[in-house]
Image: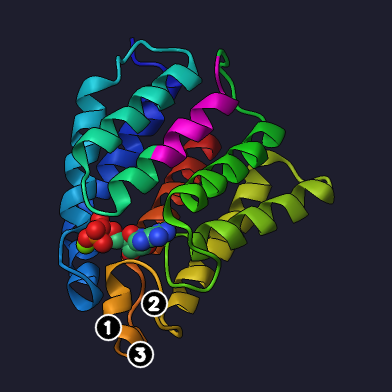
Amino acid sequence: MATRVYECLKAIGDKIIANKDFLTDLDREIGDADHGVNMARGFQAVIEKVPEDEADIGAALKKTGMTLLSTVGGASGPLYGTAYMEVAKIFAGKDTVNAEDFKLALEAAIAGIQKRGKAEKGEKTMLDALMPAHDAFSEQLASGADLVTALDAACVAANEGVEFTKTIAATKGRASYLGERSIGHQDPGATSATMTLEVIRDFLKG
Ligand SMILES: Nc1ncnc2c1ncn2[C@@H]1O[C@H](COP(=O)(O)OP(=O)(O)O)[C@@H](O)[C@H]1O
Ligand SMILES: [Mg+2]
């Protein structure tokens, strides 16, 4: 029987695959028109390679990270791959998710992406969705909110982050070749990161 973590990964994959053309079109504007193609290929492999009956969230996420590393390519493959591998460490041996671990997971994902990609907030990358999402999530936890409420706030902040990427020039990754001409376009990686958070939020709500 499929475990909850597998079902959640499948839901993320389904969302990415359904938005393959949208994400690719975003990348056509400021990159090389492959973000959706890359991510859809990666998550197709994740859906096939993660064992449906894997109950250990850490083990399932480690497999996800390794699969993304070896199948996605581009800048986003190593970045997402590393993020999932780092998050896997937080959930090693666990089969449930609590708010405190989710906060640590967001921190681990961000740290992994920054270690690999050397980007900061405001460079028009996936971090412009994930860092505000983390801040909003932490703020909610500090004021006593539960996991789903905090995730709702994180998703709002991530969407605001995507909007913010429209207003700034890229200074990292392929889009940085365009310089000021990248202004006006939303970042594909910030968009796929926000989709991921929204799927997790919906999954944990359901
Ligand atoms: N150094 C970086 N740090 C964080 N994210 C990055 C970095 N470089 C690129 N990205 C993210 O990767 C996305 C592009 O992914 P993708 O198109 O799959 O790879 P590539 O740029 O190699 O074609 C960007 O929209 C951005 O969010
Ligand atoms: Mg690209």
Q: For the residue marked with disc 1, what is the amino acid? A: Leu
Are there few (<14), some (14-19), or many (20+) residues within 10 Å of tag 3?
some
Residue at position x 20%, y 24% in the image: 48
Residue that numbered label 3 is attached to: 180
Q: For the residue marked with disc 2, what is the amino acid? A: Ala
User: From the viewer's perspective, is residue 34 above or below residue 93?
Assistant: below
Ligand 1 falls in which quarter?
bottom left
Q: Is mark 2 within 8 Å of ligand 1?
A: yes
Q: CA–CA distance between discs 1 and 3?
A: 6 Å
Q: Is residue 116 rendered to the left or right of residue 102? A: left
User: From the viewer's perspective, is residue 90 above or below residue 169?
Assistant: above
User: From the viewer's perspective, is residue 23 above or below residue 74?
Assistant: below
Within the image, what quadrant is residue 104 found in? Answer: top right
Q: Main secondary structure of the magenta part?
A: helix
Q: Earlier in the sequence, mark 2 or mark 3?
A: 2
Mark 1–mark 3 contact, CB under 8 Å?
yes
**Label ID, residue 170:** 2
In this figure, which colouring scheme has been used for the structure? rainbow
Q: Is residue 186 rendered to the left or right of residue 39? A: right
Residue that numbered label 1 is attached to: 178
Mark 2–mark 1 contact, CB under 8 Å?
yes
Q: From this viewpoint, is residue 184 visible?
A: no
